Amino acid sequence: MNIGSVQFFKRVILCCLALMIIIPTGLAIALGIENHKLSEELALLKGKIPQTETEETKDPEAVSSIISVVSETSRAETKLNRILALREKAAGSPAYSLDYQDLYPDLYIDHDWVFDKEVSNAVYLTFDDGPSEVTSNVLDMLRLYGIKATFFVVYDDSTEAADLLRRMVAEGHTIGVHSTTHQYRQIYGSVESFLTDFEKTAVWIEEETGVKPEIFRFPGGSVNTYNLPISEMLIAEMLRRGYLYFDWNVSSGDAAGSIRSNEIVSNVISGVAHREGEKAIVLMHDGPGKETVKNVLPHIIESLEASGREMLPLDNRVEPICFDY
């Protein structure tokens, strides 16, 4: 057969047609096989998912609560993803245990995680570390101006402390849990350690006042250098139990021993001013040795009232301010 003859070109054309049929057919067969393998793997995974969720979640409604409250909180999507990722890791690894969920079966709050409409000009004055000898003066000032505030308290089994708790309730203030020991290394040693510390103060408040506390503040804030390794697990567990925690977006700076009265006032007033159009949660302290707060309160209250701010107490119907991770 001569190159260039009619027969030569016929054979070339036939070979090209054959290749055009064989190559796509081969590729199709290969893709079909791969697709079949992937389908089998997907089916296998689908079969495993319910079992994993059951092992991870002892209470499905509790996880729903976590999702609800975090979705209502600032920068919620990032928080939720991190919490759920950590819970998934904990469920699949023997290095993690969720046995702490069985501790303190009465340490639960019924909460639908529906928040009231935001009061855009609201200021929430909060006091940590009391009750102490300072608290009585703080309460006197608040009563004088007709202001309701929030006290995140530390356990104190004295008669004087119990009387102050009852006075807080009688005068319309909110009491939240802060700590029993206020020893960061001890509290944040594990989730179990935190729950043990929290439970003692929560029970104390309820026994002395008849009111079960529904909100709390982490010692040092929800994310700090002591609790960072377990902060997400702590938050997830406390939300699962129905409790709501509050950080702050304005600090008075009164925790510093050398701070002057005018600096505290300036910190609060300027901090609130920077929160124009949104709520401000102010961190102050009424613990032992914090006498300065009773002196600055009149100036703070009068300045806030003059600026048109409404001072209110926190409760679990207020959408919280929470730190980022």
Image (cartoon, rainbow, N blue to C red):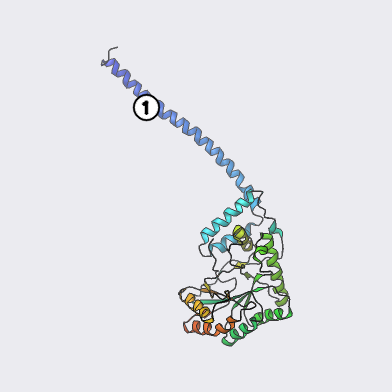
Q: Is residue 69 left or right of residue 160?
A: left
Above or below 103: residue 115? below
Q: Where residue 277 appears, x then y in whole percent?
A: 45, 74
Say which residue appears at 57% left-offset and 41% top-offset.
43
Above or below 1: residue 21? below
Say which residue appears at 29% left-offset and 15% top-offset.
7
Above or below 103: residue 246? below
Quarter of the image with the C terminus is bottom right
Q: Is residue 240 left or right of residue 23?
A: right
Amino acid type at image mark 1: Met
- Residue at the extreme top: 1
- Residue at the extreme bottom: 144
Quarter of the image with the N terminus is top left
Q: Where residue 58 appears, x then y in whole percent?
A: 67, 55
Q: Is residue 121 left or right of residue 218?
A: left
Q: Pick the residue in front: 174 or 136.
A: 136
Q: Pick the residue in front: 117 or 238.
A: 238
Q: Pick the residue in front: 16 or 154.
A: 154
Say which residue appears at 52% left-offset and 35% top-offset.
36
Q: Give the total of numbered labels.
A: 1
Q: Where residue 148 appears, x then y in whole percent?
A: 58, 81
Q: Which residue is mark 1?
A: 20
Above or below 252: residue 31? above
Instruction: Please tell me whether mark 1 sits on a helix, a strand or a loop.
Output: helix
Q: Where residue 202 appears, x then y in whole percent?
A: 69, 70
